[in-house]
Amino acid sequence: MAALTIDEERAAANSRLTAIRLAGLTLRWMENWRRNVQDYDSAMILLAVVAITAGRLLRADLDQDLRDMAAPLPEGTLAKCNVSSIAAATGLNRETTRRRVRALVERGFLVRMKDGTIRFRPGYLQQDRTIDLVRTQLETFARTADELAREGTLKPLG
């Protein structure tokens, strides 16, 4: 598998193109998330829940069978997430975060555990639409990386 690195000289020479491509990538990603929940604050909350609860899985030696989103994670695998941590991660004020989380719970995206922990509803991450969203995000990233490589901003390492 080829690793990529930044060609500093080409990155500087293409900095405007790179900035435009990255802005477009960010907007497409956010639009894909927003499409599922109708507003950007809610999309940011869902992203924060992923990052807060599952970020540590990237630092662990995760079993091969748990790397596939189709496999639910065992209880206790995820980190705790609450309104305060979501507000801190998103920059949203706490009351806005609380209202949006409540709405996402009512709409079946999230659940609030008895201890106040917020998680995705069981089975949500295994739904076809969620798996399709991840695939769409990956395709968007690959296209942007290809464009940056074609322009010489990104190059194979070594």
Image: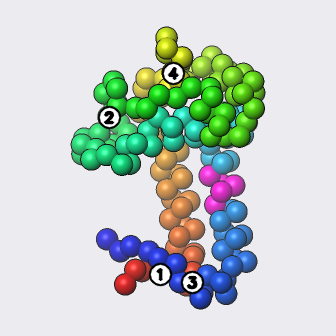
Residue at 54% over, 53% down: 137
Amino acid type, mark 1: Lys
Q: Label 3: few (<14), some or many (≥20) within 10 Å?
A: few
Q: Which mark is residue 71?
A: 2
- Closest to the observer, 144 or 63: 63
Residue 58 is left or right of residue 64, and the answer is right
Question: In this picture, which residue range is highlighted in magenta?
Answer: 25-29
Nearer to us of marks 1 and 2 is: 1
- Identify the element where label 3 is drawn: helix
Instruction: Characterize the local packing of mark 2: few (<14), some (14-19) or many (20 or more) Cα atoms within 10 angstroms.
Output: few
In the rendered image of this protein, does residue 147 appear above or below residue 103? Answer: below
Determine the image quadrant of residue 56.
top left
The residue nearer to you, when weighing 93 against 4, is 93
Q: Quadrant of the C terminus?
A: bottom left
- Label 3 is placed on what type of residue? Glu
- Would you name the residue on which mark 4 appears? 117
Q: Is-magenta flag for residue 105?
A: no
